[in-house]
Image (cartoon, rainbow, N blue to C red):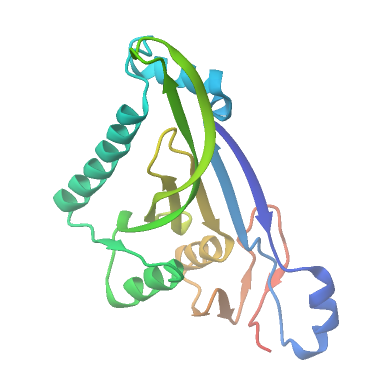
Amino acid sequence: MRLSFTVSGVADELSDRYGDLLTGSYDCVDRIVLNAYYPLGHSPGGFRVWWRRLHDDSDDQLDNAHLMRLAGRFARRVRAFAAAAGIPVIECTRGERKHLIAEEYLRTHSVSPGVFLILVARAPATVWDVRRSADGRVIGAIAKKTSHVNHYSFHIMDPVWGHLTIKMSGHPPFGAQVILNGHEYVAVAAQGEEIGFVKEGNCLLVSRIRSAWPGSQTPCRSLRL
């Protein structure tokens, strides 16, 4: 498994331009996205190695039917886990803002650390088309293609990071993204220090705090436009 990440935040030019309209600011990374994937899974040979490691070093059953069965097994296990733990699973339609669904759920429910909601939606993903000989004994080609498959967003309440999301493709080789929110990190740190604040959208309105982001000493005050 390999992790790569991107970080997004507010551009300094925007802060400079509207600085006279702000009563304060705080220094915080907006969002971190970690891409988790098997590094060899993006080439036909690498995907074949990935499959063999799961099947006693054999690719006798590496075909489209067994790939679909693996995706179906993953889906059934997710739903069985959710049912046993009392976690709601919501099917999302095209265009729905999934983060708004999660935020509304948090407004109306008290959650404990761990997975509290699973959202399912179709989105493009890399899948593999395996072509075998007529007798099925020899793999002729393994072709990469893009297809719309179910993705599962596991919404998690973490003691340090607050609300975070792990979004995972439901089709082999099950690529995933870990989505972290810097404002949630600051909010959890403020609660630990018993510093009062009000959350407005994705920002915090507070009267007195130092940024909880590691290495930063920027004072954090109320942010209003």
Most extreme residue toward the left is 84
Q: Is residue 1 visible?
A: no
Looking at the image, which residue is at 58% across and 75% down?
203
On the rendered image, what quadrant is the C terminus found in? bottom right
Residue 53: x and y in percent read 40, 16
Residue 12: x and y in percent read 81, 69
Where 90 sits versus 69, above or below?
below
Looking at the image, which residue is at 72% across and 87% down?
23
Q: Is 33 situated left or right of 104 in this image?
A: right
Looking at the image, which residue is at 32% across and 72% down?
105
Q: Is 13 or 146 nearer to us in this picture?
A: 146
Q: Is 100 or 116 nearer to us in this picture?
A: 100
Q: Is 192 situated left or right of 211 in this image?
A: left
Q: Is 130 situated left or right of 106 in this image?
A: right
Q: Is 152 or 66 nearer to us in this picture?
A: 66
Looking at the image, which residue is at 43% across and 73% down?
100
Q: Is residue 6 visible?
A: yes
Q: Quadrant of residue 11?
A: bottom right
Q: Quadrant of residue 218?
A: bottom right
Where 3 sits versus 180, above or below?
above
Q: How many marks?
A: 0
Residue 101: x and y in percent read 38, 71
